Amino acid sequence: LVVANKYCCWKLKLLIEEKIIRERLDFFSAMNWLMFSHSHSCEMLKEAAICILAINRRSGIHHPNIGSLETEAPDLHLAIAKIATGASDNEIVDQFTSMGMAELYDEVEEW
């Protein structure tokens, strides 16, 4: 993933992200994948990790390392909190607003 990102092989990067999401991403690994994806511009993986952490937070289950996000990556902490509470600061509403990163990439591929 790091090499695919470095050499702008975005299709390969998306395939690897998708495989990680399907086969490796779970509640226990979500924090590590979130930090990795944030530092390597892996938007699809980052979105999936944020969703897992937010859904569990909404259910009252907090990841043991969630507190470290407040100081290390406050923007990620805020994103998780917004999804968990259903809040949004997005003022633009169009056909792309409700799409996830994978759907957006598919849409771009069709153009």
Image (cartoon, rainbow, N blue to C red):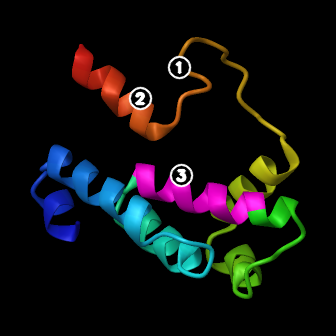
Q: Position of residue 68 (x, y in %)?
A: 70, 84
Which residues are drawn in magenta? 43-55
Residue 42 part of the magenta segment: no
Mark 3 residue type: Glu
Numbered-mark total: 3
Q: Quadrant of the N terminus?
A: bottom left
Task: Please say if the residues under marks 1 and 2 sit with CB atoms less than 8 Å apart.
Answer: yes
**Residue beneath label 3, please?**
47
At label 3, counting other C-alpha atoms closer than 10 Å, the crowd grade (few under 14, some 14-19, many 20 or more) is some
Mark 1 residue type: Phe
Among all residues in the image, which is located at the extreme front?
Answer: 23
Q: Quadrant of the C terminus?
A: top left
93 or 51: nearer the viewer: 51
Residue 109's image quarter? top left
Looking at the image, residue 94 sits to the left or right of residue 109; the answer is right
Residue 86's image quarter? top right
Question: Between disc 1 and disc 3, whose residue precedes?
Answer: 3
Q: CA distance from mark 1 to mark 3?
A: 15 Å
**Residue beneath label 2, please?**
104
